[in-house]
Amino acid sequence: MRWMNYRFVIFVLVFVAGVLLSVPSLLNLKEGPKITLGLDLQGGLHMLLGVDTKTAIKSKIKSIASSIKYFAEDNDILIDDLRVSGEKITFKLLDPDDAKKMDEFLAKDKGLLVQKEGETYTVTLTPKEKESVKEYAIKQAVDTIRNRLDQFGLAEPTVAKQGKDKILVELPGIKTPQEEQRIRKLIAKAAHLQLMAVDEDRQARVDTMTPEEAAQYGDVILKDRHGRKYLLKEIPILDGSMVTDARVAFDQNNQPVINFTLNSEGARIFGDFTAKNVGKRLAVVLDNVVYSAPVIRERIGGGSGQISGGFTVEEAHDVAIALRSGALLAPVFMEEKRSVGPSLGADSIRSSFIALVSGFVLVVLFMVLYYGIAGLIADIALVANLFLIIGIMALFGATLTLPGMAGIVLTVGMAVDANVIINERIRELLREGVSVKKAIEQGYKNAMSAILDANITTLIAAVVLYAYGTGPIKGFALTMSIGILASMLTAIVGTHGIYEALMPRIEREKNLSKWFGIKV
């Protein structure tokens, strides 16, 4: 049968799929794929964060010091007075014969600047490496914050670098002060996990010791959550960069704890240290707070450990997310915060909806009045196009922003553009006396190059906007891209299929004024 041509079947299937995918969003149903509204449409939280890159350099220095200490112990190299002071590391070799091994180890890292005076080493970062650490700290902060928010379950948060050292964060749907406070804590949490040895020889004097005195022994004084002081070796045994996983669990008293897993290097260092320090205490430190300091009873293999310390379930969950997503190399701080009210979103949606409906009605009327039934066929393709845009966005859980709605409104006008070109080509051929069937086939063929050129160039621009834009620009580019692809499908395939299905009737009636709005 004529109506069973493949173009018509494809069009019907696409139309039905678009309608089915759109229904949950249009009717606001709980089940099924739905479009998420952006910050500007449903309200939420807008934040501009700064990054303390100087701390990232200090963390890098401390990590290098840990590597030097482990390398020396692993290779039986005797070193003395290993200290971290600001942005430099100093230590002294006790055996000059070990200098070659140490020099070869330090030379592997091209970002280190090493100075020697006799057997005393001073290690710092090169200026180029410092800049590299700062840039990486900002990039890592963007990735880490985005991972934390994704794992927290927020829909389509916007996290992007802004300027040289700022981070833009937009969170749609955050409406209560409690939600806002929890999110801010999750974002700002450094999640810097360190396993640090307790200085057993001097721990008894910790309450009377000043930080300056502790520094003389290469120690640091930290408190636990109850205010008790611990004297810890400043250079950690290992840190959170070696954590591969962290999960909430419950101990024998049904209290929340966090079980963490280390990578192979961390597991080896952890196992070696616990084997050599049986009977001594190892402090589990998170963001400079001691959570526990258990006595090592035996070598701990397997590369796993536990953080306990009176967590609530919510706290444990958020800390586990922070550990899994990685520690912030540099602390972030709030520079600007704005709460966007949902009333703005309601006004925006109402205005955009009025614009969309108005534009749609005017286009539909113009096409019918100017092209007759051919215009009505183009309008059917336009309706399919709108359902397809909404359906595809819902299927992939895309976020609809105010500029995105502007993109849909613009797509309404662009969607019929292809059919205008096709209809004009068909009308030209009909005026020349070509048969209806041949005019339709030739009209689509002649219009194809112009349609492809116009849509592909616009699509390229939309893709570039999406790749390099942020927030609202991405929303506009997304709806434009989907709209262009959908309009090419509905205009080129859909309307052609409808013409083929209706061809017997068009040829039988021979009323070109009715069908194409012309008199021949």
Image (cartoon, helix red, strand yellow):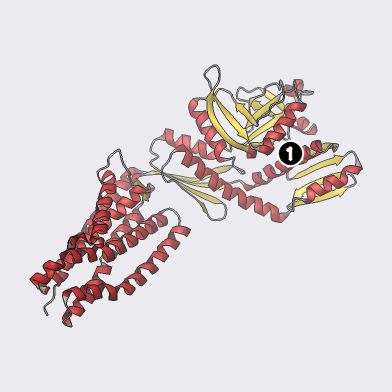
Where is residue 368 shown, x and y percent of the image?
A: 15, 66
Q: Quadrant of the C terminus?
A: bottom left
User: Crowding at label 1, few (<14), some or many (≥20) Cα neighbours within 10 Å?
Assistant: some
Q: Is residue 438 above or below residue 207?
A: below
Where is residue 476 shown, x and y percent of the image?
A: 37, 57
Left or right, residue 450 beside residue 274 = left
**Residue depicted at 27% across the width and 40% down the height:** 29
Q: Is residue 424 above or below residue 114?
A: below
In the rendered image, which quarter is residue 492 located in?
A: bottom left
The residue indicated by pointer 1 is 66
Where is residue 487 shown, x and y percent of the image?
A: 30, 62
Q: Secondary structure at mark 1?
A: helix
Where is residue 178 shown, x and y percent of the image?
A: 43, 33
Q: Quadrant of the N terminus?
A: bottom left
Amino acid type, mark 1: Ser
Is residue 351 visible in the rendered structure shown here? no
Left or right, residue 190 beside residue 402 = right
Direction bottom: furthest residue: 432
In the rendered image, which quarter is residue 369 located in?
A: bottom left
Left or right, residue 235 beside residue 154 = right
Is residue 433 visible in the rendered structure shown here? yes
**Residue depicted at 55% across the width and 37% down the height:** 324
**Residue depicted at 32% across the width and 71% down the height:** 451
Q: Nearer the viewer, residue 78 or 453?
A: 453
**Residue depicted at 8% across the width and 70% down the height:** 509
Q: How many marks?
A: 1
Direction top: furthest residue: 253
Q: Is residue 388 above or below residue 235?
A: below
